[in-house]
Amino acid sequence: MAVDLPALTQDARLSYVLSCWQRWRDVHVWPAREDIDPLDLKTLLPNLFLLESIDSGRRFRFLLAGRIVRQNLGFELSQRHLDELFSGEQLAQAEKPYRQVIAGQGHYAVQHWLQRDRPVMEFRRLLLPLATDRQHIDGILGYGLYERLDGNADSPVDHLNDPVSITMLAAHSVAL
């Protein structure tokens, strides 16, 4: 695997998730959800989320979201579709990296979330492919790191009542 992303490998948590994914992949083309060993990720589970691709990537549904993910968003993501959370151009931008992953590439991004033009969160995300049959990608393993920028570390960002705009600071493909 050729990953030439210093920011990805410098963060021990992101590097660890990537190394686990590589081990789960083992001799298969892609790892399946059942290959994920929760013991590998015991301390990282709160930041994990899983999505499934529906209709060959026309839609994406969150299967589960860890405690830290839910805490920072302020609502349950599980069983929600991406198009329930975004629409229009924001949906197109949100779906783009997920489509890249189901096409066979990993994705790493750094974003600032803004409310009323004020940065409230820095979000770093790693997305990796999963395949039920270990051949055809139909799922995504995600890992997110959140850092509040507005001093409100204990309160979620209210996406539903006070919409967030997302500024992409960096986005990189991860060769797998």
Image (cartoon, rainbow, N blue to C red):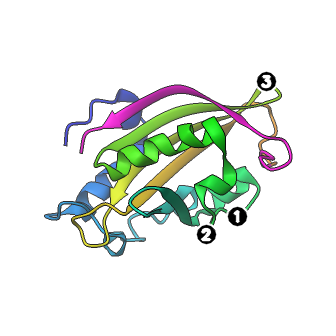
**3 or 2: tag closer to the N-terminus:** 2
The residue sitting at 67% across, 56% down in the picture is 84
Pointers 1 and 2 in contact (C-beta within 8 Å): yes
Mark 1–mark 2 distance (CA, rounded to whole Å): 8 Å
**1 or 3: tag closer to the N-terminus:** 1
Q: Write down the region rendered in magenta.
A: 156-176
Up/down of 116 relative to 127, above or below: above
Residue 79 marker: 2
Neighbor class of circle 3 (other Cα within 10 Å; few <14, some 14-19, many 20+) is: few
Residue 76 marker: 1
Neighbor class of circle 2 (other Cα within 10 Å; few <14, some 14-19, many 20+) is: some
**Amino acid type, callout 2:** Gln
- Quarter location, residue 47: bottom right
Mark 3–mark 2 distance (CA, rounded to whole Å): 30 Å
Residue 117 marker: 3
**Amino acid type, callout 1:** Glu
Q: Give the residue furthest to the bottom.
A: 34
**Amino acid type, callout 3:** Asp
Q: Position of residue 166 (x, y in %)?
A: 65, 32
Up/down of 111 relative to 45, above or below: above
Residue 93 marker: none
- Within the magenta stretch, is there residue 8? no
Up/down of 142 relative to 115, above or below: below
> In the displayed structure, does residue 73 sit left or right of residue 97?
right
| Element under disc 2 | loop
- Within the magenta stretch, is there residue 160? yes
Q: Give the residue furthest to the left.
A: 27
Mark 1–mark 3 distance (CA, rounded to whole Å): 25 Å
Q: Nearer the viewer, residue 37 or 137?
A: 137
| Element under disc 3 | loop
